[in-house]
Image (cartoon, grey):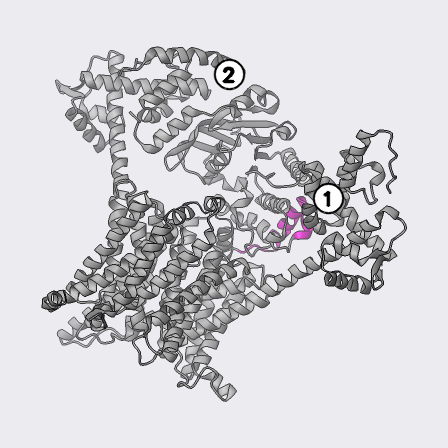
Amino acid sequence: MANWFASLDASLRDAVFVVGVAALTNVACALLGCYLVLRRMSLLGDALSHAVLPGLVVAFVMAGSLNIVYMLAGALAVGLLTTFLTQVVHRQGGVPADASMGVVFTSLFALGVVLIKRYGQGVDLDPDCVLYGQIDLVEFYTVNLGGYEVPRALVSIVPVLAVNVAVILLLWKELKISSFDPALATTMGINAELLFYLLMALVAVTTVASFEQVGSILVIAMLIVPGATAHLLTDRLSRMMLIATALAIGSAVLGYAASLAWNVAAAGPMAVMAGLFYLAAALASPRYGIVSTLVRNAQTSLRIVREDLLAMLYRLEELRVERRLGAREATKAIGAGILGDVGLWSLARRGELKRVDGGLQLTDSGRRRAAGLVRSHRLWEAYLVQHLGLPADHVHTPAERMEHFIGQRLAEHIVADLQDAHQDPHGRAIPAPTTTVPEVATETRRHGDATDEGTEKGGRG
Amino acid sequence: MPAPPLEIHDMTVAYHRKPVLWDIDLVAPEGQLIGIIGPNGAGKSTLIKAVLGLAPLASGQVRIYGLPYAQQRHLVGYVPQRETVDWDFPVTALDVVMMGTYGRLGWFRRPGAAERRLAQSCLEKVGMQGYAPRQIQQLSGGQQQRIFLARALAQDAHIYFMDEPFAGVDAATEQAIVTLLQSLRDGGKTVFVVHHELQSVRNYFDFVILLNLRLVAAGPTATTFTRQNLQQTYGGRLTILEEAAEAVRLGEPPR
Amino acid sequence: MIALSNTQLVMLGTSLLGCVAGVVGSFAVLRRRALVGDLLAHAALPGLCAAFLLLNYRALSARALGEVAAATSAWRFTAMLAGAFVTGLVGVAVVTFICRWTRTKEDAAIGIVLGTFFGVGVVLSSWIQNMPAASSKAGLQTYIYGQAAGMTREDVWFITIVAAACLTLVALLYKEFKVFSFDPGFARAQGWPTLTLDLVMMATLALVTVVGLPTVGVVLMAAMLIIPGAAARFWTDRLGRMLVVSGAIGAASGIGGTLISAGALESVLGYDPLAFGHNTRNLPTGPVIVLCGTALFLVSLLFAPRRGAIARLVRMLTVRRRIQHEHLLRSLYELSEPRLPRVLEVPLSQLIEDRSWTAAGVRRLLRWAGRAGLVERTATSAKLTTEGLALAERVVRRHRLWELFLISGADIAPDHVDRDADSIEHFLTPDLVRRLEAQLARTGRLPPAAVGAVPLSPHELAAHEAHRSNSPSAQEPTDG
């Protein structure tokens, strides 16, 4: 393997190193990030990744070098301290939770910066490194492991990733329950507090292991963004974790490519890529995306216009108006502008409407659909009059809005609740259902309810 | 005939498109103590919030003495639910009451001696004159409620909307508040009170609005607060309205 | 400006900055928006860099045309801060947008915007560092960690103007900010444009943030906004005073931090207590300012008169001791109750058993009671004095009335009551006790004879009831 690796082109080897280390780091962060996002504690990740700084410095001073064991221990201690202090300031001091977190992590960070300036001179633990990491130089820091030169970064990040994965797999059920419903977890005998501190410990350790490689910016981004992105795409925790993992790796690859293209340090572009993934998901997620919501809303608006057109034409037929309405007149009558024209076009394409002598004419299928709508409209009018006690002259507008949302099931329920499902409050016939509805079944239920109706109506006067 | 203090016409209120109050039609009489009664989740608070422009109207209109609320703000006093604010906020009882005068003061002008005097007198009216310099966290639930009431009094309004002023107060405070509301009413003000304790309705209110997702009934307590109307308000769930609300929220008819 | 030494200049700048950050940050803390400062500071970076790039591009092209670079340093500084201000506010807007339009919650939204915007900023800044002829590329580093020591006269002027503007705005809109922060719903119903007020608040926060960036840097700017407000809240319950205290704490941190980092400790003490054998001075000013703020916060947290941790602790201990004292009196009373009005000598062993106290604890309590003249004690026993009896009667009466009330009102079985009554009874005011008694008498739970006296314990009442119903002829001992 060493030979194969050595034979690679230098820039490619560089790429493999950088992307590999970054991907492992990102994944370690993103996995924990899923829990942080679900528990609405994302900012604790941000806070921890700043607050561990003094722990790092103290560990460095004590070890005399960047010894990973010391550093992880220091981070662990300060990470737990941060969590603990935040809770103490919040509970004992009565300071709001967010402010107490802000006070604690910024203070520790300030302490860390002072300590670095003071005792960290001459080492590569300088503020720059904290911010950007040294991911671009990863191949220059290597250790000899079993005869192979491997990047030193791997020595710290691989075990941490392994621990994260192991804890998540072992405590899958417990972490899941305590993330979604801490109260339930407690009643089931799971120590939610302990799990919380365990999670914080993992975050602190992961932060530090990642820190050195990718810098604090990327740690914050990776702790929060992939998890939040995955949460837009799925509702299942296991899938969320897989998606977050894929996003974390994707950010590493694309971020590295971008860093080459722009000739800048890799950490920044990786964070930006994660943000772009989030943007894409926020826009285009099938269920929760903004665009999909807008498209759905537009579709609904178009459907409403279409249905308004059909219902209007149906009513004209019902009134036996001989003259056929033109397109312009029709869209104007339902108060729709351009959308009305789109609606007409769409109706024609669906074969529910045709043009005869320049006028509009319902087809059979259009008429059936229109009858269904008018039925919904009049059922709702009848319902409003009978059950909400609205005067008959007030019910047209609400029914005009509701008719588009009454499905077959709801219509059946309304029929079952009405005394007379054949006539609307204005005395017009309610069209019969166009699809095969088991009319008999609803009839029998209707009689049962009718007696109650009578007394209720009477009571109101 | 002068315009009624509150007139609601075909009002539907929806949160995220999902209707929570359906097609309310209502005219309230002037100079009465009016109870808004209904079960939990019936939309009582929503009704008040919609009137005050704090909840989105999906349709319909609201008139205060014949004009939209935005033009009649100075005629309206509001007592929100007690839990809606942070009682640890660094203000004193007097500060809170003085907030009632801010609307009249307008931009930039600071409350002066006149406002202070008015706030003091409002505190006296609710029997809290000794508590003016107290930080509000140090007051009991009933006292906090009285402070909110005093703030509404300081708004010097014609119509008051009160969201559960009796929630979490002891019997003596409740009695004191009722007496105060009655004196407001006797002074010609119209007072709307969200209330859910059925036993006291007959004693407290001249007029009731029975609400459960839709208006069940509205009228003088004697004729409207009947067993039949109550059964309609509280009895059974309105599955059809709930189903319809869900259908609107989803935006597609479940074919 | 009068001639100032460099340290004085920096001190003026940092204290003004600390003051204004403390004032506008207080509102953020009170509105539970403390971390918006963090967001603003991070999101400002890309704007800063973009403005720098733009300016540099102009400067480079100008040079290429053979002209003198037009941008003066003050103009350059203003333009960069304007860029930072804009992207900072855009960041806040994006967070609002995300919360409104997606299922992502506010905390994650802040994290996403913070991380991504900062990432963009870092990309731009490394780009700048790679630029061939960038005139002052070292400048950007200072925005991340801050460099107060390099503060120029123009910087101080700038800070002064911004501070004056922000403080004036807060003074003008004090009433509006107050009602909006306390009760947004009420403010909106009253007709205040809450969206605009929110925006104005965010804008002042953003303005202060970007002005502070060159001095204390990104992360520590958040500290400047949060710490003074959080500390000031401990000292007062009035918003106006809190703003003043917060401003003062901010200013004090600025002055203290500047002095310490300039080696003031050394010149005062004659040696540098922070040296530890390393070279002295050159402590970075920004972090030291923040640590000064942290120290003031800790002092507030511990020593503030009413809300401070020590005051709370003392209060708690006082209450706990009073409860213990009352328990002692009640035990003494109840143990000699059968023979009242004669007061019995109660053996210590019986007291210890009655309350499951330790022997030492009982002795300590008795020592206190003896000093207060409530108890006469011997080595092995104790006895209430007349004063002690009077006080004990009040305590027992309160306890039993409360117990009775709990049983009648809350319908709890008598044997579950003791614990509850134990904790609340100590806080009942005399007025409340009187009302309690009146109500119990009215509802028939308390025999009329017992009004104003010490009623029989509910436990015994229950026993009597049971006894009476079992054997109607049994003789009842009379109670007082």
Q: Residue at x 82, y 45 (%)?
A: C454
Magenta segment, prevailing SS (helix, strand or loop): helix
> Dot 1 lies on which element?
helix
What percent of the width, then of the height, locates residue C260? 46, 80
* Rendered view: C306 above or below A143: above
State which chain disc 2 sits on: A
Specify the amino acid type for callout 1. Trp
Q: Residue at x 17, y 25 (%)?
A: A350
Q: Which mark is residue C359?
A: none
Q: CA distance from mark 1 to mark 2?
A: 48 Å
Specify the amino acid type for callout 2. Glu
| Residue furthest bottom in the image | C270
Q: Residue at x 84, y 44 (%)?
A: C453
* Rendered view: A185 above or below C367: above
Compared across the picture, whether B67 is left or right of A158 comes to right
Circle 1 is placed at which residue position?
Answer: C402
Compared across the picture, whether B108 is left or right of B136 comes to left
Q: Nearer the viewer, residue A92 or B238?
A: A92
Q: Tell us which disc is closer to us: 1 or 2.
A: 1
> Dot 2 lies on which element?
helix
Counting other residues with Cα less than 10 Å from the Cα at mark 1, is it few (<14), some (14-19), or many (20 or more)? many
* Rendered view: A71 above or below B199: below
Magenta span contains residue C142: no
Circle 2 is placed at which residue position?
Answer: A456
Report the magenta residues as a range.
Answer: B110-131
Compared across the picture, whether C386 is left or right of A333 comes to right
